[in-house]
Image (cartoon, rainbow, N blue to C red):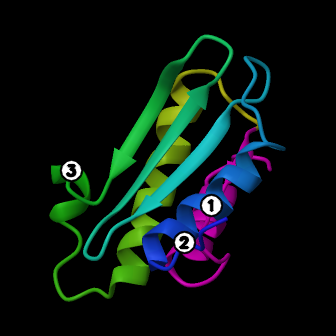
């Protein structure tokens, strides 16, 4: 068995391990987080249908106008509040959190806390 030696490869393995346990249903879809070097993305996904119910990212104009001089962690909080608003519009109140293989720390935690503050339950 060969070892996966890159950081991305190890993150993908952790994400696969998390995804074996976490499944988004119509009653409780999955809030998936992806974090790149400069941006953060969030999606609310119903895995049984294979559809994305709501999405938000730091590339959108609603977030870009507010991110002047803010840290990446603060911008992730803006994305978390935006995803909670959009999920509530679609009638989603409870989600299961998929951290995407990342540590629950920094930008991932800021996004989750802002989504909770916005009204999502997980």
**Is residue 116 inside the magenta stretch?**
yes
Q: Which residue is mark 3?
A: 60
Question: Upstream in the sequence, badge 3 or badge 2?
Answer: 2
* Horizontal relation, residue 102 to residue 68: left or right: right
Q: Secondary structure at mark 3?
A: loop
Looking at the image, do the residues carrying marks 1 and 2 touch, with CB atoms under 8 Å apart?
yes
User: Residue at the spot x=63%, y=21% of the render?
Assistant: 91
Question: Upstream in the sequence, badge 1 or badge 3?
Answer: 1
Q: Which residue is mark 1?
A: 13
| Distance between the alpha carbons at the discs numbered 1 and 3 | 29 Å
Residue furthest out toward the right: 21
Q: Which residue is mark 2?
A: 4
Give percent across and percent down for residue 113: 65, 68
Query: Which marked residue is nearer to the observer: mark 1 or mark 3?
Result: 1
User: Residue at the spot x=69%, y=30% of the render?
Assistant: 29
Q: Secondary structure at mark 1?
A: helix
Residue furthest out toward the front: 1
């Amino acid at each position: 068995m060969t070892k996966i030696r890159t950081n991305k490869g190890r993150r993908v393995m952790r994400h696969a391990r998390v995804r074996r346990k976490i499944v988004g249903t119509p009653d409780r879809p999955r809030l998936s987080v992806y974090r790149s070097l400069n941006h953060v993305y969030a999606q609310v996904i119903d895995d049984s249908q294979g559809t994305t119910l709501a999405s938000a990212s730091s590339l959108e104009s609603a977030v870009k106008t507010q991110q002047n001089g803010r840290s990446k962690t603060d911008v992730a909080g803006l994305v978390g509040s935006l995803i909670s608003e959009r999920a509530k519009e679609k009638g989603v109140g409870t989600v299961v959190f998929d951290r995407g293989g990342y540590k629950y720390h920094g930008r991932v935690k800021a996004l989750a806390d802002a989504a909770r503050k916005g009204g999502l339950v997980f």
